Structure formats: C-alpha cells, structure tokens
Amino acid sequence: MTRPCNDSFLRALLKEPCPHTPIWLMRQAGRYLPEYCETRRRAGSFLNLCKNPALACEVTLQPLARYPLDAAILFSDILTIPDAMGLGLYFTDGEGPRFERPLREEWAIRDLSAPDPWDHLRYVTDAVTEIRRALNGSVPLIGFAGSP
C-alpha cells in the first residue's frame, strides 16, 4: 500500500518527523457545516445518511473542500453495529439515539449474535470503497470502532 500524498497523519502515528502537527475534524463532517445540513436534509434522516454510501462519501469529503486537513474520517455512527444486531436504531430530535428493542434482560444480551458485515453492514464497506476512490491518495482515511 502506498502512502497518500499528504502523509503527515501517518508520520505522526509512526512517531516520524512531521512538517507540522496533523489536523482533522473528529466530529466527522462537522455537523455545523451548511453543506452537511443540506446533505442531511436530502437524506431525510441521520440514519439514511449513514446507510447511503454516496451521501456518506459526500459528507466525509465536505470538510476537505473547506480546510487543508491532513486526514478524512469516515462518516458513520458506532450505533450502526447494534442496529445490525437487530436492536432497531432510530433517532429522536432533541433526545438522540434510541433502540426499538432495547436489551433489558441478561438472556437478551447472551442471545445476541454478531451481524454478518457483508450482509447487514455492507453500506459501511461500500462507503469506505467510495471514499478511498474519491480521496485518490490525497490524505489517509480514518475509521473508528466502538464496542460495549
């Protein structure tokens, strides 16, 4: 794998000398950006935005169009995993994420199974492919993970 044109972020991770301290927007697309708000409006909901690889790519790239950042961060949400496990994620305005089927009993937790990523989370891998293609080696793409 070749390094991106701007490899400051990777150099910092490897503790190599960097021309400057790398920067990126940790809040993904920067939900304050007007172009993000417009894309989200077109998507119809936050979850639709996460599940649409083309829109997730668009939102991931938006901060790079505005600022000379050293990395892009995948637009997604850590709660897509429990949603793929069958908990039924939805978002309530002013309150945040909710599950249609919250886990309230120990047996329900034991009965969970890991989702097949190619079946239930394919939209994430498709977004990564699309974003990497769009970045065309300009900057690294940062992913993230979360777990209980």
Image (cartoon, rainbow, N blue to C red):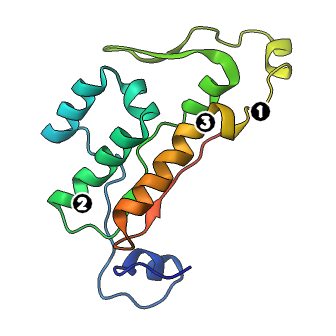
The residue carrying pointer 3 sits among few (fewer than 14), some (14 to 19) or many (20 or more) residues within 10 Å by Cα, namely: some
Identify which amino acid the numbered label 2 is placed on.
Answer: Leu
* Residue 7 horizontal/vertical position (percent): 40, 80
Is residue 90 placed above or below 49 in the rendered structure?
Answer: above
Please count the marks in the image: 3
* Residue 14 horizontal/vertical position (percent): 54, 82
Q: Quadrant of the C terminus?
A: top right
2 and 1 marks in contact (CB < 8 Å): no
Q: Is residue 33 left or right of residue 115?
A: left
Q: Which mark is residue 121?
A: 3
Is residue 17 placed above or below 94 in the rendered structure?
Answer: below
Q: Is residue 148 visible?
A: no
Element on which disc 3 rests: loop
Residue at the spot of label 1: 114
The residue carrying pointer 1 sits among few (fewer than 14), some (14 to 19) or many (20 or more) residues within 10 Å by Cα, namely: few
Q: Is residue 9 left or right of residue 38?
A: right
3 or 2: tag closer to the N-terminus: 2
* Residue 80 horizontal/vertical position (percent): 55, 31
Is residue 118 placed above or below 95 in the rendered structure?
Answer: below
3 or 1: tag closer to the N-terminus: 1
Q: Nearer the viewer, residue 29 or 138?
A: 138
Q: Is residue 126 left or right of residue 39?
A: right
Q: Which tag is nearer the camera, tag 3 or tag 1?
A: 3
Q: Is residue 108 visible?
A: yes
Q: Nearer the viewer, residue 47 or 15?
A: 47
Q: Which mark is residue 64?
A: 2
3 and 2 marks in contact (CB < 8 Å): no
